[in-house]
Amino acid sequence: MFHEPLDRALALRVIRVTDETGAPVAGKTELEDEERRWTFVPDRTWRPGSYKLAIQTTIEDLAGNNVGKPFEVDLFEPVQRRLSNTTVKLPFEVR
């Protein structure tokens, strides 16, 4: 669940589930509830093991804000022009 609606096309591309080897888990993703709830249904039944929710920091809300660049910039300070494109990984376990 997200506090703000996300950019649908971008969210469906930059959020994924990976297995313990880092390989993507095949499945269907959806953005529902006015683009505030991301869901994933795997193509096959979950197998017990370690997984990660992998989210690229380029994910954006509808205003273009993302965690890979500052939201507010001091116009009198130099601005970093390069966008950070890293991935945040949140581990979870299926038993």
Image (cartoon, helix red, strand yellow):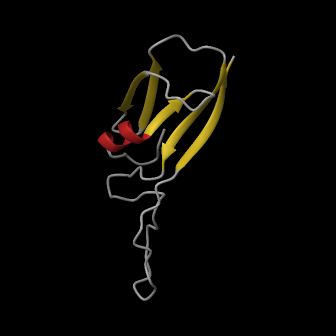
Farthest residue toward the top?
45
Q: Where is residue 28 drawn, in percent x and y?
A: 39, 22
Q: Quadrant of residue 80?
A: bottom left
What residue sits 43% from the left and 21% below the top? Answer: 27
What residue sits 42% from the left and 63% below the top? Answer: 83
Q: Nearer the viewer, residue 1 or 18?
A: 18
What residue sits 32% from the left and 52% below the top? Answer: 62
**Above or below, 87 relative to 29:** below
Q: Nearer the viewer, residue 5 or 12?
A: 12
Q: Where is residue 48 drawn, in percent x and y?
A: 66, 15
Farthest residue toward the bottom?
76
Labels in figure, total: 0
Q: Where is residue 11 drawn, in percent x and y?
A: 38, 41
**Above or below, 50 relative to 48:** below
Q: Nearer the viewer, residue 82 or 37?
A: 82
Quarter holding the C terminus is top right
**Above or below, 17 relative to 56:** above
Q: Where is residue 88 drawn, in percent x and y?
A: 56, 47
